[in-house]
Amino acid sequence: MCNMAAEHPGGSKIILKFAGKDATKEYDPIHASDIITTHLPKEKHLGPVDTASVEQVIEDQTPDEHRRTLLYAARPPLSDIMNLYDFEVLSRELLPPKTWAYYSSGSDDEIALRENHSAFQRVWFRPRVLRNVNKVDFSHTIMGCKSSMPFYISAMALGKLGHPDGELCLTRAAGKHNVIQMISTFASFTFDEIVDAAAPGQKLFSQLYVNQDRELTRRYVQNAEKRGIKALFITVDAPQLGRREKDMRMKNAADSGNDAGAKVQKGQKVDKGQGHTRAISSFIDPSLNWDDIKWFQGITKMPIILKGIATWEDAVLAVEAGVQGVVLSNHGGRQLDMARSGLEILVEVIGELKKRGLWPNPNFQLFVDGGVRRASDILKALALGASAVGIGKGFLYSYCAYGQEGVEHALKILSDEMEMNMRMLGITRLDELVPEMVDARALTMHTVPSPEHVLYNNTCAFPCYH
Ligand code: 173
């Protein structure tokens, strides 16, 4: 137990805080169910818990939990939800503050987070008219997989924090509506539990954080291939997790009470207030580099996509490394603050690949993620040359608020928006989308005022000082 506490990636404090108590509620969302069998040596498996000996914690709801329970019961009917932002507004009120802080936090001043949204606002349409747009078809092929729409559900960690069925809400809705889900390495459910929840023939992608223990990574990748995963998205923009300060502050607040943990920790080096992600991410290998790509190509036949490319220079290196594509992204504004939006990177990358005779390229795909909430966003990215886009938080918040039904409703909203926008753009199929249908001249101009006049109002944790 003591050894374990010292090595626990989330710090020893939390272990000591729950020592001798039932920690299921805290443990479950953050740990996949196979973590004990895959990470804890056999000799440390002490056997089944004698529940009679466990200190029972009968928890009354706090006034805030009670308020949220009432709010949850009084959610508007799904038919009132007009767009993907509506889910986000509801989630902010419905989720426990710690969960909202973890999901919604961008890094540092959250400028990259906001930029993802505002970049789309700097691209305008040039619609064509008087074309027969009676029948509109927006089905698409992504990495050889048929999809009802030109996006995939991007990987997000710790889904159970937001809903008991977590990522499975996505899997079930995606299977029903024929869209592709990318499974996160740090999902709350195990990789196999998610694949098992998929419908027969349902197409899935896998996101990979490369572990310092390459043997674990090899097993993870080869299991993914065996289970029929269609593409491997290796995250390359997170050698260290960004400072998501909202998340970090919540951890500090939770730990600052006068509990046993705090006393026992006195004088010890404490892993203070890292927040959910930084704690879990200690497995990620910061030594990952271009030479490792060959190793991946040697252990799997799945197509490899590098997720988190932010410059044309690295896109060229990716082509040269022989991978099948890249995701142009700033990691939802959660990594390097002020890294540009995927949309802006896309225009730069295509220009430079063209100059080098590397574009168009049937063997290399460009994906974009970050800030996508509307079909108009998707169409802008496709017009500018993206093969497809990734949507994460839009779907995350839809299941936080309404479970699987919420995800299905989000898909229906996007489908309606796709049809309407394509008609008004003057196209009936996605291959009719051309760069001339957008005006992206302002994309590289970063002079748009940020939505909040005083940035620190957004990141400050001490509202009484406002
Ligand atoms: O953005 C994230 O939160 C993320 O990528 C992550 C990384 C490690 C653990 C959990 C989440």
Image (spheres, rainbow, N blue to C red):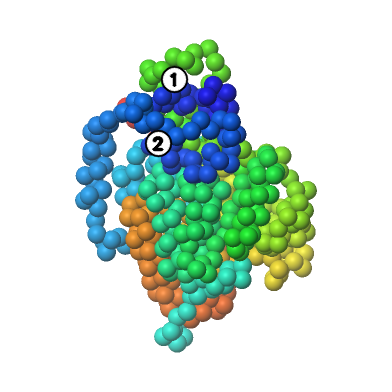
> What's the residue at 43%, 40% (across, down)?
28
Whether residue 19 is situated above or below residue 373 in the rendered picture:
above
Q: Position of residue 20 (x, y in %)?
A: 41, 24
Taking the image as shown, residue 58 lies to the left or right of residue 437, namely left
Identify the disc placed on residue 261: 1
Amino acid type shown at disc 1: Gly
Q: Is residue 80 visible?
A: yes
Q: Is residue 462 visible?
A: no
Q: How many marks?
A: 2
Taking the image as shown, residue 269 lies to the left or right of residue 321, namely left
Q: Position of residue 231 (x, y in %)?
A: 62, 61
Quadrant (top left/top right/bottom left/bottom right) for the C terminus? top left
The secondary structure type at the circle numbered 1 is: helix
Amino acid type shown at disc 2: Thr
Is the distance from the Cβ of mark 1 to the nearest ligand 1 atom less than 8 Å? no
Rounded to the nearest angstrom, the CA distance separating label 1 from label 2 is 18 Å
The secondary structure type at the circle numbered 2 is: helix
> What's the residue at 65%, 53% (across, down)?
221
Q: Earlier in the sequence, mark 1 or mark 2?
A: 2
Whether residue 198 is situated above or below residue 36 in the rendered picture:
below
Q: Position of residue 359 (x, y in %)?
A: 71, 68
Question: Around disc 1, counting alpha carbons within 10 Å, would you say few (fewer than 14), some (14 to 19), or many (20 or more)?
Answer: some
Marks 1 and 2 close (CB-CB < 8 Å): no
Identify the disc placed on residue 24: 2
Q: In this orientation, which residue lies closer to the viewer: 265 or 126?
A: 265
